Amino acid sequence: MKKYFVILSLSLGLIFIGSISCWAASDWTGNVNLLYGTKSIDGNDYWWMYSQYGDHTRTDIDGIASQKMMGLSIDFGGKTWPVNIVIGIVKSNDEDTTHYTFAWSGKTAIKKIESSINELRFGVKKAFEVMPKIYPYIEGGLVSIKVEGKYNWDSDISGSWRTSDDGSVLGYWLAGGAYYLLADHFNLGFELGYSKGKVDIFDGDMQGGGTNYGLFIGYHW
């Protein structure tokens, strides 16, 4: 994960945790959760790009369709509110390397593609206490999605070639899950979610959203 994601996550977490002592004594409630899991995007999408020779080539991205994911979610609201406000950041990335050997010459080539997807989420969350200390929940809202892509080609025949592109889109997200409350203040749970948003990158449409699932730990007040 990139350095700015860690810095932003820590900053937001410290700001909210620093306010918990004040909120806990009032009529406020909320959670700070750290999520780790997997994000699956549409591997049937593709990138189009111009090579160093001007060829317009198509590159499939199924090799980066399953990405490692990390996220930070913060929700808060009044104890009498019907829903909480939720803000979250989710980052995923992956890379795929393919090796080629040309039978007619014995020469080799390496193709490497990389993708990084950042989501900034804003919406509402509703939790239900179905059993003591067990809280299923649903949440959703708007999401700003940014996709960054890199393409590297190294060949004994044609040499090296590098290119990159990025794109952004405003979409929506939905998620649900459940958590168990430990010692009245610590969350342990799981989440399954979906985000939607097509991004124009490398002259092709790529699904910046996707299905994500994982486990989380957090703090409740």
Image (cartoon, rainbow, N blue to C red):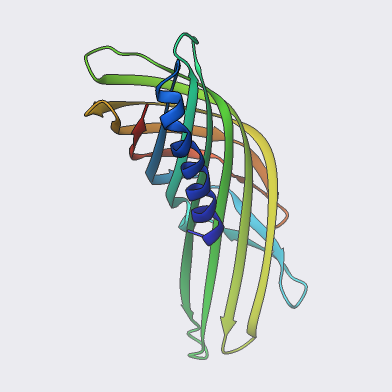
Could you say where residue 115 lies in the image, as x and y percent from the top left?
55, 58
> Along the horizontal axis of the image, is 43 left or right of 213?
right
Q: In which quarter of the image is residue 56?
A: bottom right
Image position of 117 with respect to 80: above or below: below
Judge whether residue 10 can be spotted in this image.
yes
Q: Given the current orientation, which residue lies at the most extreme right position?
A: 54
Query: Looking at the image, which residue is at 73% across and 54% down?
Result: 203
Query: Looking at the image, which residue is at 39% across and 46% down?
Result: 38
- In this view, the residue in front, 26 or 65, is 26
Image position of 112 with respect to 77: above or below: below
Query: Looking at the image, which residue is at 54% across and 73% down?
Result: 111
> Along the horizontal axis of the image, is 53 left or right of 118?
right
> Along the horizontal axis of the image, is 55 left or right of 76?
right
Could you say where residue 83 lies in the image, as x and y percent from the top left?
49, 15
- In this view, the residue in front, 128 or 202, is 128
Could you say where residue 218 lies in the image, as x and y percent from the top left?
35, 37
Could you say where residue 163 lies in the image, as x and y percent from the top left?
68, 70
Judge whether residue 42 can be spotted in this image.
no
- In this view, the residue in front, 56 or 189, is 189
Q: Quadrant of residue 23?
A: top left
> Along the horizontal axis of the image, is 98 left or right of 203?
left
- In this view, the residue in front, 166 or 53, is 166
Image position of 156 with respect to 194: above or below: below
